[in-house]
């Protein structure tokens, strides 16, 4: 009451002063002698006197306005000293013009144990082959190798196999893309279902026949439509070893753009399906078509309990080098592993492609003659003009000798006398005739070879694991173990080139709209998984399982499978036909988890739009969900229909808000819709007391009169003219806007550092080559260095300043950039870094690619760093000996440059291509519009561009020591990436006739995770009934690797580490832990259960899975 009286008195004083001032001014005018002149005699000199009086009146009004402003600030300061807590007040301006926010000022702490920092400082993996060193070594000269154009001539001595015969394992396969030229369903209907129907019959005709299959998405669709007899016949073939499931993921995932959490999800979905329906588990990985290979994949397969893997699409110069040194088979080790715990045995196919002409040996002209689908009369033939010949008794000896020569030459590239020969191609074996052509003719060749001891060969059909087991046996080691003298490799295989200077770096950015959409839906799915698992557990404990809609579990399953489908290497890559892309988008929109958040999409190709919350006399409610592990301060934005609004917490306290305009164009505001931005601390995240906070929105008729004007200041610059729309815009913001009109961002200075670091943002464009070979969906073939982006009209620049955030929006013809800085204490990653959104629209461009370049003072040299799948960091080097397009790499989550003083990290919410073409620079390709095909099979360009929002965060960190270069993100960087990719979800509660049922904070988890732990998922495990979950839940954890050499004072959130120790039983509030069982990553292999009160221990970078039973 005392505060209200003070406000009333001061408000009255303002009113009195205003009225009295106007009275004095009018009085002076009325008593002016000139006024006594008659109206009829009004000389020109008196007009001048009147004008002077009017100008004096305007000056007095301006002075009065300033007096009122000062009194208003005094009232606000007086209000700040009132009797109630500061957290109960809205933000306001202090007397000096700065904004005052009602934060509680609770101290935060950072407690990282020294031992948790030693991991990043330790020595790196000791390997024989480090891919960065291999790149430095090679000349990439592309010398003509003869029949093996990208290799060299291979010779051998005829008696080399006298003591140990050559073992040849021919592995029939069919690569089926779940969407590329046709949609997933059309491929299945036209071809894939016929492959399975033929497989069931043809493999059963001869037990010596073998086959492998990879894509479980297709297999599951066939299984669901097959009758019991076909299902049983298929199961018999698998259990007998004639048919092997390789990798077993829902798709053959892309390895450049896919996030590791999505890669794991699709692997789990495929493996869980296999376990439920067939009871089998894959042993070997098979990746013949992803466009380059990530070091993340062998780690995930290793954690899923596989022992071997195969890769194909590797730069032709790398293949040549590895073939020359007989290093095509190696142990693939993670860069941080100083021992051999992550080693995965890997086979690299040596030649151009995985089709038959490039798999039997070095000469495709000869190998094509043994692809019996191309027999004369077929619709496909051999480009080398020598067709295959059916094997007869008359020609079998000659044909067997020719084929064996190729087998022997190929075997000379490896370190064992065991040879792998894949036999297949895209969508092969869809006709019964091909099964007969291939199997009958090859069996005749095998029978002849095997019956002639002088040939010293044993040939057979085989599965992939048959081959790997034969290698292990020949070398006398257990499966998955390093054979003697085999090399150890670390690094990855990007960027892929299949010939000449045709580097496949374009697909890192192609169709960024869908790359961004995928990342958003991945986050939504993860949030739904976690909430669903916990809600079901609480329902079971309360005996309400029958009332809780557990039958909705199939919705989660559909969402998993549709998001999993998009991880396919022609989906997230942006390399499918336009109609196929639309199909993926519709699956996203119609069959994926669409949490009832504030952002809704009208169509699959539209940007999300916020729902307008219409305020009336009754309150509206909003639920906030924080899906990350740590406390976060966040700005939540809503659209309302009233400029008078206040937001109350569950216990009735008023939250700080910023009321802003809703802009309908660069310079026009909506008169009916407003943005309400509220600053809220969700101090208990999903693992620290998961909270769904409920807030009340009230159309406020009790606000003080000065709140009727929006709580923000703004300025628009257009054509070098300033349109001043609010007198309270500060001079410093005007200066910022003038600098921003060219570069948008000029420099960054940390609050705790007097040194300003130049960080200019520039925009550039690339064209494509004028020659025959041009850029397309896969390839990036620029016409030279990038050119500065230019347009005829100067950009429109809008500056907004408010209590919670300030932002600058620059409107260009083909993009709009927003740089937002929040006004909050500390360095919490939710709000402390500049938040950058680049809205791109290139639909009127032809053969152009838009790039954003960061230019800094950081002395990074030729080294930069990019992430692999959001899981690990890979050092890169700019090589002048390589063309420009070869120096671009995938950036799914972040890239950074650094020197001995600073590190600048660009965090991204969507996968894009990135490079550092000069010291101190980072460059990102934002979008590509290309009018032609690049001759890689797609048959069209990229002309279906969408208006796309690319979201970034810049993090500038100062080194606390000048130690050696470290390839791990800091703790703050990890948190920034997580928060950028998992936004707080605002869930408006729909009004009902009978009111809103009581809602309270939902806090099912009580424990606190160490801040170097990331909760990948808390996922309900399937039951036999697809519509219901089992009583078990999968907990997936990732312990992060940290670089502690970057300063992180006042992080804005509490942070502790525990040297990898975590008590699972203490995490759950109101639930008992009845089972804690370590599992393989895909949940197919179990270890003995731990006691329920046990702590689990994870090493840095380790991903682990556990089976829980909560009740």
Image (spheres, grey):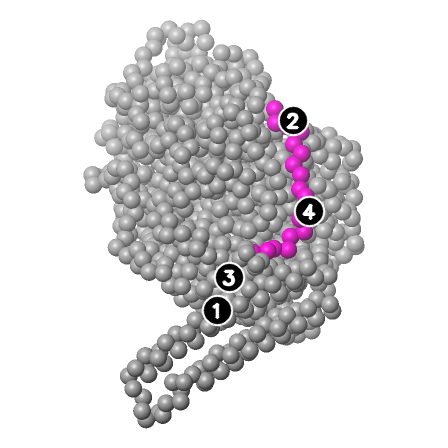
- Which residue is depicted at the point 36% across and 37% down? 505
Sequence-wise first label, 1 or 4: 1
- Residue 795 vs 751, above or below: the answer is below
Q: Is 1092 positioned to the left or the right of 131 in the image?
A: right
- Which residue is depicted at the point 42% across and 83% down? 32
Foreground residue among 161 and 590? 590
User: Picture quarter containing residue 937?
Assistant: top left
What label does residue 957 carry, if any?
none
- Residue 1023 is one of the magenta-drawn residues: no
Look at the image and tell me in which quarter the N terminus lies: bottom right
Q: Are marks 1 and 2 in contact (CB under 8 Å)?
A: no
Q: Secondary structure at mark 2?
A: helix
Q: For marks 2 and 4, give the one nearer the viewer.
A: 4
Whole-angstrom CA distance, mark 3 to mark 1, is 22 Å
**Residue at label 4?**
106
Q: Secondary structure at mark 1?
A: helix
Q: Secondary structure at mark 4?
A: loop
- Which residue is depicted at the point 37% across and 63% down? 723
Measuring from the top left, give residue 801's x and y in whole percent.
49, 57
Sequence-wise first label, 2 or 3: 2
Dot 4, how many residues are within 10 Å of its Cα: few (below 14), some (14-19), or many (20+)? Answer: few
Q: Which residues are magenta?
A: 99-118
Whole-angstrom CA distance, mark 1 to mark 4, is 41 Å
**Residue at label 3?**
712
Sequence-wise first label, 1 or 2: 1
- Which residue is depicted at the point 51% across and 61% down? 712
Q: Is 975 positioned to the left or the right of 215 in the image?
A: right
Dot 1, how many residues are within 10 Å of its Cα: few (below 14), some (14-19), or many (20+)? Answer: few
- Residue 106 is one of the magenta-drawn residues: yes
């Amino acid at each position: 009451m005392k505060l209200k009286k003070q406000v009333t008195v001061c408000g009255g004083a303002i009113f009195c002063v205003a009225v009295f001032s106007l009275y004095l001014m009018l009085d002076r005018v009325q008593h002016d002698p000139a006024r006594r002149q008659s109206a009829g005699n009004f000389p020109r000199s008196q007009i001048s006197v009147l004008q002077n009086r009017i100008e004096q009146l305007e000056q007095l009004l301006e002075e009065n306005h300033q007096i009122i402003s000062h009194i208003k600030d005094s009232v606000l300061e007086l209000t700040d000293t009132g009797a109630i807590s500061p957290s109960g007040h809205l933000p306001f301006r202090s007397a000096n013009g700065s904004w005052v926010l009602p934060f509680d000022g609770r101290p935060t702490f950072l407690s990282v144990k020294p031992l948790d920092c030693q991991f990043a400082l330790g020595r790196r993996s000791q390997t024989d082959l480090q891919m960065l060193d291999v790149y430095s070594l090679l000349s990439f000269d592309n010398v003509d190798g003869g029949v093996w154009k990208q290799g060299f001539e291979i010779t051998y001595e005829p008696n080399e196999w006298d003591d140990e015969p050559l073992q040849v394992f021919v592995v029939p396969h069919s690569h089926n893309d779940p969407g590329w030229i046709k949609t997933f369903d059309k491929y299945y209907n036209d071809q894939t279902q016929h492959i399975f129907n033929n497989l069931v019959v043809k493999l059963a005709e001869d037990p010596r026949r073998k086959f492998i299959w990879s894509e479980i998405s297709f297999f599951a669709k066939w299984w669901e439509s097959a009758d019991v007899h076909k299902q049983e016949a298929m199961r018999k073939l698998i259990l007998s070893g004639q048919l092997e499931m390789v990798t077993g993921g829902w798709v053959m995932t892309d390895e450049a753009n896919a996030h590791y959490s999505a890669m794991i999800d699709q692997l789990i979905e495929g493996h869980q399906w296999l376990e439920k329906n067939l009871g089998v588990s894959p042993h070997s990985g098979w990746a013949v078509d992803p466009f380059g290979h990530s070091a993340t994949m062998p780690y995930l397969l290793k954690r899923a309990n596989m022992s071997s893997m195969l890769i194909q699409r590797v730069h032709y110069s790398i293949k040549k080098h590895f073939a020359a040194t007989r290093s095509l088979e190696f142990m693939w080790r993670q860069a941080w592993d100083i021992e051999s715990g992550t080693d995965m045995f890997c086979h690299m196919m040596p030649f151009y492609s995985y089709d038959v002409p490039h798999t039997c040996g070095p000469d495709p002209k000869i190998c094509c003659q043994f692809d019996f689908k191309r027999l004369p009369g077929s619709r496909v033939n051999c480009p080398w003009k020598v067709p295959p010949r059916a094997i007869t008794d008359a020609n079998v000896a000659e044909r067997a000798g020719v084929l064996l020569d190729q087998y022997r030459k190929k075997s000379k590239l490896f370190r064992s006398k065991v040879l792998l020969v894949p036999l297949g191609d895209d969508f092969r074996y869809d006709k019964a005739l091909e099964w007969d052509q291939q199997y009958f003719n090859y069996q005749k060749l095998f029978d002849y070879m095997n019956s002639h001891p002088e040939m010293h060969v044993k040939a057979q059909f085989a599965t992939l694991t048959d081959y790997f087991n034969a290698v292990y046996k020949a070398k006398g080691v257990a499966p998955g173990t390093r054979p003697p003298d085999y090399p150890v490799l670390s690094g990855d295989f990007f960027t892929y080139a299949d010939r000449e200077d045709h580097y496949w770096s374009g697909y890192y950015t192609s169709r960024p709209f869908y790359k961004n959409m995928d990342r958003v839906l991945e986050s939504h799915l993860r949030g739904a998984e976690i909430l669903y698992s916990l809600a079901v557990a609480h329902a079971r404990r309360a005996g309400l399982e029958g009332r809780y809609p557990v039958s909705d579990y199939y919705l989660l399953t559909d969402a998993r499978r549709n998001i999993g489908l998009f991880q396919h290497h022609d989906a997230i890559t942006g390399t499918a036909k336009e109609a196929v892309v639309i199909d993926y988008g519709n699956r996203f929109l119609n069959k994926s988890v669409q949490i009832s958040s504030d952002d809704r999409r009208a169509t699959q190709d539209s940007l999300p739009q916020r729902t307008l919350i219409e305020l009336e006399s009754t309150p509206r409610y909003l639920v906030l969900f924080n899906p990350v592990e740590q406390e976060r301060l966040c700005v939540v934005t809503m659209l309302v229909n009233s400029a008078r609004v206040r937001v109350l917490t569950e216990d009735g306290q008023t939250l700080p808000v910023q009321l802003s305009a809703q802009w309908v164009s660069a310079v026009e505001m909506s008169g009916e819709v407003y943005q309400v931005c509220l600053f809220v601390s969700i101090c208990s995240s999903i693992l620290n007391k998961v909270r769904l906070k409920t807030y009340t929105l009230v159309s406020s008729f009790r606000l003080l009169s000065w709140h009727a004007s929006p709580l923000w200041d703004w300025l628009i610059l257009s054509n070098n003219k300033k349109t001043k729309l609010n007198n309270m815009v500060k001079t410093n913001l005007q200066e910022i806007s003038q600098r921003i009109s060219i570069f948008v961002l000029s420099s960054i200075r940390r609050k705790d550092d007097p040194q300003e670091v130049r960080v200019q943002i520039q925009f550039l464009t690339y064209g494509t080559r004028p020659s025959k070979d041009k850029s397309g969906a896969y390839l990036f073939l620029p016409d030279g260095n990038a050119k500065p982006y230019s347009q005829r009209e100067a950009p429109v620049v809008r500056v907004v300043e408010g209590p919670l955030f300030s932002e600058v929006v620059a409107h260009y013809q083909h993009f709009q950039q927003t740089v937002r800085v929040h006004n909050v204490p500390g360095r919490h990653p939710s709000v402390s870094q500049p938040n950058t959104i680049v809205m791109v629209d290139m639909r009127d461009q032809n053969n152009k690619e838009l790039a954003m370049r960061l230019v800094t003072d950081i002395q990074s040299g030729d080294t930069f760093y990019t992430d692999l799948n959001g899981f690990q960091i890979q050092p890169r080097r700019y090589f002048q000996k390589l063309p420009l397009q070869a120096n671009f790499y995938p950036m799914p989550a972040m890239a950074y440059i650094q020197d001995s003083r600073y590190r600048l990290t660009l965090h991204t919410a969507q996968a894009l291509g990135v490079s550092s073409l000069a010291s101190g620079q980072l460059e990102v390709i934002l979008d590509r519009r290309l009018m032609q095909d690049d001759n890689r099979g797609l048959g069209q360009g990229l002309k279906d561009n969408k208006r796309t929002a690319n979201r970034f965060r810049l993090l500038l960190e100062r080194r606390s020591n000048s130690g050696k270069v470290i390839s791990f993100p800091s703790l703050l960087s990890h948190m920034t990436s997580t928060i950028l990719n998992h936004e707080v979800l605002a869930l408006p509660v729909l009004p009902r006739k009978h009111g809103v049922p009581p809602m309270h904070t939902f806090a099912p988890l009580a424990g606190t995770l160490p801040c170097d732990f990331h909760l990948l998922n808390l996922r309900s495990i399937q039951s036999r009934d697809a519509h219901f979950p089992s009583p078990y839940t999968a907990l997936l954890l990732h312990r992060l690797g940290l670089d502690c050499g970057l300063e992180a004072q006042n992080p804005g959130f509490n942070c502790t580490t525990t040297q990898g120790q975590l008590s699972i039983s203490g995490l759950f509030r109101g639930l008992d832990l009845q089972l804690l069982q370590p599992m393989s990553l895909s949940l197919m292999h179990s270890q003995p259960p731990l006691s329920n009160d046990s702590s689990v221990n994870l090493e840095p970078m380790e991903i682990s899975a556990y089976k829980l039973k909560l009740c």
